[in-house]
Each structure stands twice: as structure tokens, then as C-alpha cells.
Amino acid sequence: MSIKMKAVVINEYGDNGVLNLIDVDRPEPQESEVLVKVKAAGVNPIDWKIRSGAGERLGMKLPIHMGGELVGRVEKLGVGVEDFELGEIIFGMVHTGGFAEYAVAKSANMVRAPSNLDTVSAAALPLAGSTAWQAIFGEAGLSKGQRLLITNSSGGVGSLAIQFAKARGAHVTAVASARNEDFVRGLGADAFIDYKAQPFEQVAQDMDVVLDTVGGDTFVRAFETLKKGGFMVTVVAFPGDEAERHGVKVKRSYTVPSAPNLIAIRKLVEKGQVTPHIEAVFPLAEIKDALALSESGRARGKIVLRISS
């Protein structure tokens, strides 16, 4: 007899009205997978984008079990899994199914959660942390002494990127609205630009690296802040010929699961050099409110679902 659990599922694309919290069969881990009793799951812009139709463009098939990252307790080990023990708290990214009471994950994409964080705080790290880490270090090669500009420094990705860059010894210029100045400076930002008060590209100059998490006109204008030979890395835009015109490099970064990156992030957290910021915590039943807040673009840090104690 199958075991039932609650999960967030969509059967069609649209607004938050298509989200369903329903009873489904609890999954079973296959070879090299683990079954996780989910404690908390991070909410990300990709979630409402998938809900709105990006799932089809990403090759996902309806119905889609929502949620791309989680923190939880190892409940069951699939064949061949030797990295974890039952009862351990782990975290990482999953292709689908993070917004549920249980989820299966590839063991290669999961690592032990930071020992000094509760599960809600840890849920802020896997996807946003991996996105920031891969973009500024993996793609742009940011190093000690270089100058980094972040186009949205107060969101889930940007707030972690500030801390990663400072831990590496870089200089960080943070772009955000005035209400977030104290927040991003508290994370370690060396300079702040209120994008509503003045065009940021007229203030910031000679940047080695720009991390763009906004896209659109902001992405295009950010090229003007780079020095010759600088590097623009974007996690949202689709580059055209801007780099050639400005004499710089540009790369679209697509986040992929990486256990080594998560381990590096965990080490910084356990050293006290990185602290995730949580904007709001919702129960699983309030997934619509959580996605609405994410879609508003006004979240400072991360939004998290608390799924079990």
C-alpha cells in the first residue's frame, strides 16, 4: 500500500491559481538517490517562472511537482548510496519536487547541511548560493583585490554574492534601493548606489566583474561600468553584441547542481563568514503567498517554506 504525502503540483501553466497542494504517493529512491523528509525549501524566481510557462521551455512535462531546493533528513537510501547515513540533515538542489513533505534527490547533488544553521536558514543557500558562486567564481573568475558590481544586491542571490566576494577579498559595489542600503552594507558592501536616485552606470566605473541578476535595460547599462577587458556575468539576460562594442566579455550563467560548490559555501557559513538572510517564512499551505512575494521583486534575501519540524 502506497504512503501518501502533501505536495505542490501544477497541471497547467498560469498564475498562482494553477497551484495545487494535493495528496500524492510518496516517492521511492532509485539507484544513487536518497529519500528526504523535507524540513524546509527555498522559494526562487524560477519557481513562479516555471508556473507561468517557463517549464515548457525548460523541457519539463506536466504535471510538474514544484520546488528546486530543499533541506531535510535522510529517510531512506537508494542502492549504491554510501555518502550519507539515515537521519542526517542534508541540503541541495533537486530537479523537481522540493515543495513536498518528502522528496527524492540524487545523492551526488546533496551534501551535509551547515552544522551552525537551523534548517530554515540552510534552505536559503542551495540554489541562490550555487547561482552566485558559479557566476562570480566559476564563470567570471573573481579574485582577491578585484572590483565587483552587483545589479540587485539585496535579493537572495545578490545578498550571498556580496558575502562570497568579501570572503574572497574583492571590493563590492552594491546597487539597490535606498531602503536596502543598511542591509547590504551590513553584509559587507564597500560602496552603495541607490539606483532610484541616480543612474548607477554614471557612478560606478572600472569594474572588473559585474553580476547581473536583473536583466533588461539594467543589463545593457551595466556594460558601461566595466573596464576594458572586464567580465559581465548574467543569470537572467540573453547577451547580444554588447560585449564586443564595449571591449569586454559576457557570459550567461546557467546554475547547475555542484556538491563541491555547496561544500565550499558550507565551510564559509561554518566559519561565520556567510550568513543567509530570510525575508519571510511560510508554511507549505501558503505557497501561493510565498510565490506572490517572490514575484513582487521586493523580497530582501530569501523566502522559505517551513515544511516540517
Image (cartoon, helix red, strand yellow):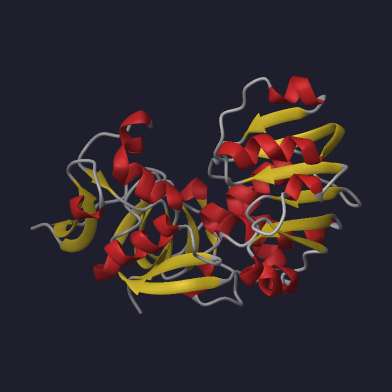
Quarter of the rendering containing residue 237: top right
The quarter of the image holding the N terminus is bottom left
At 72% from the left and 54% from the top, the residue drawn is 198
Q: Nearer the viewer, residue 119 or 243?
A: 243
The quarter of the image holding the C terminus is bottom left
Question: Is residue 39 found left or right of 139 in the rendered image?
Answer: left
Residue 227 at what x, y percent from top left? 87, 36
At 63% from the left and 63% from the top, the residue drawn is 177
Quarter of the rendering containing residue 115: bottom right
Residue 207 at what x, y percent from top left? 84, 44
Examine the rendering and report whether any part of residue 139 can be seen.
no
User: Number of numbered discs present?
Assistant: 0
Question: Is residue 199 found left or right of 45 in the rendered image?
Answer: right
Examine the rendering and report whether any part of residue 93 can be seen.
yes
Question: Is residue 170 found left or right of 184 in the rendered image?
Answer: right
At 17% from the left and 43% from the top, the residue drawn is 11
Q: In the figure, 37 relative to 245: above or below?
A: below
Q: Nearer the viewer, residue 20 or 77?
A: 20
At 54% from the left and 39% from the top, the residue drawn is 236
Residue 269 at what x, y percent from top left? 67, 69
Q: Nearer the viewer, residue 150 or 59?
A: 150
